[in-house]
Image: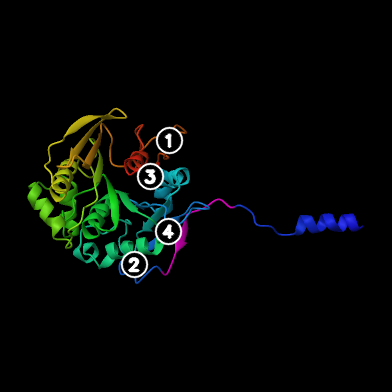
Amino acid sequence: MRIIALVLILLTTTTPSAHAATVTEVTGFGTNPGNLRMFRYVPDGLPAGRPLVVALHGCTQDAAGYGTASGWVSLADRYRFSVLLPQQQTANNLNRCFTWFQAADTTRGQGEVASIAQMVTKMAAGPAYVSGLSAGGAMTSVLLAAYPETFRGGGVVAGVPFGCATSVLDAYTCMNPGKNLTPAQWGDRVRAATPFSGTRPPVTIWHGTADYTVAVANQRELVEQWTNALGTDAVADTTDTVAGHPHAVYRDASGAAVVETHTVTGMGHGQPVDPGTGTQQCGTAGAYVLDVNACAAWHLAHGWGLAG
């Protein structure tokens, strides 16, 4: 009987069990002037001080779905960093688009951009990077302009330049056919966002040539904006191909790469992914997440040095 009792005790005693990390919501991260929701993914056992990637979904998407489909969540496990996933609410925008086109949400210290900055502070992580798709890509431009000291790098996917629109109607013109300003005009909008004398983060721009939602012309305008803001010209210093698609690098006077472009031939409006288990593969194809044999998240992570 004593043996049976011992067995029952061993079977019923609770012991800590390993649970895989999941995308979880965080509340109470600040005053939240933009009325956004905060989600995060932190791999189990992640040491303090590891990098953070802010991943911003596109219209009609949500935080967890985009974080998983884009490949950022799986890469976080692979390379040991955390992911912050802000989520828009339908009370702000019926299509869940981030409000990248109104000053009340794009001015430092105000609205949605301030909410995201508060989330980054709440994460209390190491160096931060930001990337997003479509409206999330446009909000990436906003964050890089309004909070340049917060980020080490940015990735704009199918997005638009900072300061491209100031109203909903203006936003549609900005998206397609796009606006054609001079590099100095675009750069001035970045410089006017906040006083800043430090080194601005480098920017990588992904866009599909068959994107009829956000015209590919915006990629060129983004190049002109960020090369000007980062103190160089809009003439590529090197060109080659990555995963079979045109790739260009723009360097400053020191030789540092400050702007890169990946132009995905034949791709429509969406996040580039390359589903599979190969070294450079990540992501899952779906609505506005397109299998083009190149995972933008993987290339961004490697460009930012996260794989090390």
Q: Which residue extends farthest right?
A: 1
Q: Is residue 282 left or right of residue 129?
A: right
Label 4 – label 1 distance at C-alpha: 24 Å
Label 3 – label 4 distance at C-alpha: 21 Å
Relative height, residue 277 to residue 47 (above, below): above
Residue 231 in view: yes
Q: Residues within 10 Å of mark 4 (few under 14, many from 20)?
A: some
Relative height, residue 60 to residue 110 (above, below): above
Chief SS of the magenta region: loop
Disc 3 is placed on an element classified as: loop
Residue 89 in view: no
Segment colored magenta: 19-28
Quickly name the residue at label 4: 39
Which numbered mark, 3 or 1, is in the foreground of this view?
A: 3
- Pointer 2 or 1: first along the chain: 2
- Badge 3 amino acid: Leu
Quickly name the residue at label 1: 275
Q: Residue at x 12, y 37 (%)?
A: 235
Q: Residue at x 17, y 42 (%)?
A: 254
Residue 20 covered by magenta stretch? yes
- Pointer 4 or 1: first along the chain: 4
Camera-side residue: 35 or 194?
194
Quickly name the residue at label 2: 35
Q: Are marks 2 and 3 in contact (CB under 8 Å)?
A: no
Which numbered mark, 2 or 4, is in the foreground of this view?
A: 4
Camera-side residue: 247 or 176?
247
Q: Are marks 3 and 4 in contact (CB under 8 Å)?
A: no
Identify the disc placed on residue 306.
3
Disc 1 is placed on an element classified as: loop
- Pointer 3 or 4: first along the chain: 4
